[in-house]
Image (cartoon, rainbow, N blue to C red):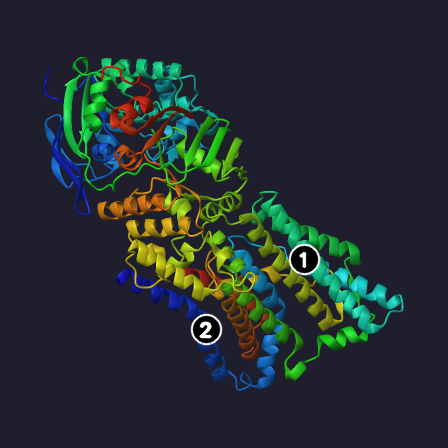
Amino acid sequence: MSATLAFFQRLEKERYAAIAALAILSIVSALLSPFFLQWQNLLNIVRQVSYTGIIALGMTFVIVSGGIDLSVGSMAAFVGCLAMLVLNAASDAGLQQGTAVAAAVGCAVVAGLACGLANGLLVTKGRIAPFIVTLGTMALFRSLSLYMANAGEFRSASSLFGELGSSAPLGIPLPAFILLGLAAALAFVFKRTRYGRYTRAVGSNSRVARYSAIDVDTTRLAAYTVTGLMVGISAVLIAMRFNSVGSSTLGVNYELDAIAAVIIGGTSMSGGRGTVWGTVVGAITLGVINNMLNMVGISPYLQGTVKGLVIIGAVFIQRQRQ
Amino acid sequence: MTGPLFRVRRLRKEFAGHAVLRDADVEIRRGEVLGLIGENGAGKSTFMKILSGIYEPTSGTLELEGRPIAFDSPSDARRAGVSIVPQEFNLAPDLSVAENVFLGAELLKFRWLLDRARMRARTAELLAELGANVGPEDRIDGLSAAQKQLVEVCKALAFDASLLILDEPTTMLTRREIDRLFALMRSLKARGMALVYVSHKLAEVKAICDRVIVLKDGELVREAPIAEIEPAEMARAMVGRELREIFPPKRKARGPVVLEVRGLTSPGTFADVSFTLREGEILGFAGLVGAGRTETAEALMGLRPSTGVVRVAGQDVKAKNAGQAVRGGFGYLSEDRQGSGILTGFGIAENMTLVSLRDYASLPFVVDREKEAAKARTWRQRFGIKAGNLDAPLESLSGGNQQKVSLAKTLDPAPRVVIVDEPTRGVDVAAKQEIYLFLSELAAKGTALILISSELEEIIGMCDRVLVMREGRIVGEVEGEAVEEREIMYLATGLQAGANA
């Protein structure tokens, strides 16, 4: 009985630890700087974390299923380059701006799905460890982007494309809007659907899942494909934001930020446990830390140090609880 | 001759108040091979684990050469001269033979550096003594089972063992390898070493041992010089006990045939398994560990590649994965509850619907949690699962309750053919009785059951017909009155039925 009770206390702690940390961090930030709580600053934080946050939503599925995806940053650059080529080709062909933008978005989504599917197939059908597969495709996607752009950047020929990137429906930046929308959708998928249940089961113990007539391969394949889709959406949003794609700069270290958001959000690195909203909280936490460091005037070069410490600290706390 | 090398007095071991070893007195003499036999659960492994320092006895004493002794750990026992060759090899596959022999007790020079030359030389010496065709530099994962076993023996002998325990050493060996092992045992014996030989294979016990002791339900029930006891009598001593009345009455089931298996073969594990099963029947699968029973079940469930014909109610159900098998009407309760049965971090309800989650969809893909909880409550009531909260994770439940959840999971899709593999392993007597009753009721309602069990008592108490497997083949079928322990034991161990009965 007491063991049960203890477990629930732990469970609740895990669920709310990330939110509690974010709340404390926000209070500290608000005390340190009067600008922190300004609406514009808060929106700015959310917009900044949206791009990696969206990727982190997919990463949550991959990590809960017991895998990892290191290729997301390079994949974003690759998909971004492809989308740009389509956008400019469509504009050159004299298509309407709206049509050209739609074609670019469609291309990003399809290319993202295809890249994710490729990762997933190598992991499941190829029976190669996810770390190795995505380490390989990380190098591959980046190299293809550099080749396509000759290591330079693609500039968008469409003004509408760039305008969309800085649009803010209802006063909320477009990427933040999309992050929250996708988070709501994927949280529902994760908690309420068969697929979400299977993802946790596979990550928890794939042998039990296989013996329970769950299609383990398809479940894991879907996690990588969802991540590819998220990368596609994220890539096109970043491309809109800058109205260009830098083949060597886009997506650098995104895998780090995405994995960090998932971990800080309370998802277990060994799989089987996690939440989608926790990942959103994790992503925002990273944004708040950066924002705070900026405001108190700490060198931007040291931000990586803090981020690294936070990741290690979050995992350390998880370990202590187990 | 002086006194015995090793003496065990009134040795007792209890787990949670349940005695698995009851005040056993045993003498182990120099220059002797002592056979230790008994059914699964008789207390053999507990006895060995106490001797080799893995368990501490609840009460009783160990004496080595007349002096009382207590082991704190296996390495403690090893230093005192007691070594064990375990049934499951305990070798690091990527290390060399010499590195394995001295693993955890490396010889050193200059206090910090490994003395690899000395370890290699000592290993080579031991291997030569054993007549092993293995070099000290060979890697473990390139060795055969027999060679690995020799490495284990080598490991045991590297520390001047005076008592060597061999746990089921011949299960993985061929006839010729067994002969070599026996020759080795005789030469060790001639050097004055004491050996304890634990085995299910009674003919081998007869061949190699000088004396035999029989454990049954934790008690030492028989001790005899080998000349005075025949394998048939050993079998009788092992199993001849009153059946406790925990089994529901058997029913004769004569429904139509629901499962037909023809020539099921999985190369290297089992071959040519054929049988039929009727509605409402409980068919027993008896045999020793490693006889191929679980592997057969896994093949039926599509969890293991195999060839042959499988028909459920006339339909071909040769499954390539568990999903196909479940859709074809199969249900499987795995013998390995923690490893492949339940998710310990998942809640009770989530575990129960793991196989049948499709049936709980309100919209496509969306789980109807109301319906799921309602079904979980029904199962909890039917099985008397003691847990207030259906979201409680399984790790907070007792073994018996976990097993009931696992069984509910297996049965939730309403399979026509249910395979239960060691359904009462690690479960207390009260839960056992409940599970037996439940399985019996299930059969009465027309479900066809296959019961795989290493507890003969269970097979005999539950089944009207029993198939016996040995070394990957069905070696016999007993039915009705013939379902009794001796007959099954003869078949399972490879002795002729009826011999010396």
Name above or below for residue B77 compared with residue B409.
above
Q: Nearer the viewer, mark 2 or mark 1?
A: 1
The picture places residue A147, in percent across and down from the top left corner, at 77, 54
What chain is tagged by disc 2?
A
Quick check: B143 left or right of B80? right
Whole-number angstrom distance, CA of label 2 to CA of label 1:
31 Å
The picture places residue B427, in percent across and down from the top left corner, at 27, 45
Q: Residue at x 44, y 23 (%)?
A: B144
Q: Residue at x 16, y 14 (%)?
A: B228
What element does badge 2 sit on?
helix
Q: Can the viewer see residue B388 in this picture?
A: yes
Which quadrant of the figure contains the C terminus of chain B?
top left
Quick check: B14 left or right of A183? left
Give the residue pinned by disc 2. A19
Answer few, some or many: residues within 10 Å of disc 1's Cα (few below 14, many 20 plus, some between 14 and 19): many
Answer few, some or many: residues within 10 Å of disc 2's Cα (few below 14, many 20 plus, some between 14 and 19): many
Residue closest to the eye, B485 or A109:
B485
Which quadrant of the figure contains the N terminus of chain B?
top left
What chain is tagged by disc 1?
A
Q: Can the viewer see residue B471 in this picture?
A: no
Q: Residue at x 42, y 58 (%)?
A: B350
**What kind of residue is marked 1?**
Leu
Report if the CB atoms under discs 2 and 1 are less than 8 Å apart.
Answer: no
Give the residue pinned by disc 1. A113
Sequence-wise, the earlier of marks 2 and 1 is 2
The picture places residue B44, in percent across and down from the top left corner, at 23, 32
Q: Residue at x 72, y 62 (%)?
A: A108
**What kind of residue is marked 2?**
Ile
